[in-house]
Amino acid sequence: MAKIKDRRKNLKNDTQDFFDDDFEVIYEDDLDDLLKNSFIEDDDEPDDYYYDDEFDDDYDIDDDYDIDDDDYDNRRNNSKSSKRKDSKKSKKKHSLPNVVSPAAKAAKTGTRLIFKILNMILKAATLILIAGIICLLASTFGKNCSTYGNPLLITEEKNYILMAYLGTAGVLIFYEIITFFWVLMGRGKQGHNGQNQDTGRGLFSFLFIGVTSFLSYILYSMIPVSPEALEGLQGGLMVYGSLCQKLLPICIAGAISCLIRRFVIR
């Protein structure tokens, strides 16, 4: 140790001309610690390299694109898997046997068949009622025809009273005959489902016969008896009015059948 101290003194004396008072002398014992500290500082100091790393981390375009590509691939795979699941579900739904639809179709077909049968029955009833009115008018007017003369001698005798009487009966009976064939031949109109729908033909005929028969029963006496033709008209309306009590129930039943065919059974 004495040698080292002497050497230090000699060095101090030799170098005092070259260095000032602030010059620091490093001893051998502190050399290792100094070197270690210098290496540590060198590792922590390179700010330039540290700055470059931050720049690369923040602005690494390739890494960002790689992440976006991965996200896109994941989304694409997820969408494909969801589509596959949906397709499998739809296939399962289609593959399941539909038990309800055949029963519904059968019920619908049965309902249509029942409605058609009911429509045919009501239409037949309408025709029967119209035919009943025709027969009632013809028989009643025929029985009272002899009161006004002989129909075979109507032109020879120029019996205008009988002509007016038979003309009144003929108009009513002819109208009912036309109505009968109009209801019989009618097919109705085409509905929204493409099928023909009954429009309730014959309704106006029942309303007309019922109303005019009632009015004839009340107003026939207001018609004058001269000239002769008016007397025959009065006689015809009197006979027609006398049928009011028989015709009204028939007309009401016929009107109901027509309304059911038109609005209920379609």
Image (spheres, rainbow, N blue to C red):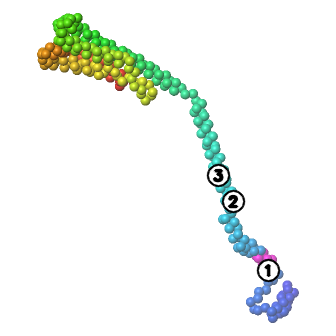
Q: Amino acid at mark 1?
A: Asp
Q: Which quadrant, please, contains the N terminus? A: bottom right
User: Which residue occupies the foreground of this view, 119 or 14?
Assistant: 119
- The residue indicated by pointer 1 is 30
The residues tagged by marks 1 and 3 sit, at their Cα atoms, a distance apart of 60 Å
Q: Residues within 10 Å of mark 1 (few under 14, many from 20)?
A: few
Q: Amino acid at mark 2?
A: Asp
Q: Quadrant of residue 7?
A: bottom right
Q: Amino acid at mark 3?
A: Tyr
Q: Quadrant of residue 136?
A: top left
2 left or right of 190 in image: right
Image location of residue 88, percent across then percent down: 62, 37
Tell me which numbered mark, 3 or 2, is placed earlier along the sequence: 2
- The residue indicated by pointer 3 is 72
Residue 205: mark in rendering: none
Regarding mark 3 in the picture, which secondary structure is present there?
A: helix
Residue 79 covered by magenta stretch: no
Question: What residue do we see at 59% from left, 36% from top?
Answer: 89
The residues tagged by marks 2 and 1 sit, at their Cα atoms, a distance apart of 47 Å
Give the residues drawn in magenta, as a range.
Answer: 29-38
- Of the residues tagged 1 and 3, which is closer to the observer? 3
Image location of residue 193, percent across then percent down: 45, 28
Relative vertical location of residue 217 with respect to residue 2 in this rendering, above or below = above
- Of the residues tagged 2 and 1, which is closer to the observer? 2
* Label total for image: 3
User: Which residue occupies the foreground of this view, 187 or 23?
Assistant: 187
Question: What residue do we see at 82% from left, 81% from top?
Answer: 28
- The residue indicated by pointer 2 is 63
Tell me which numbered mark, 1 or 3, is placed earlier along the sequence: 1
User: Which residue occupies the foreground of this view, 245 or 16?
Assistant: 245
Question: What residue do we see at 65% from left, 56% from top?
Answer: 68
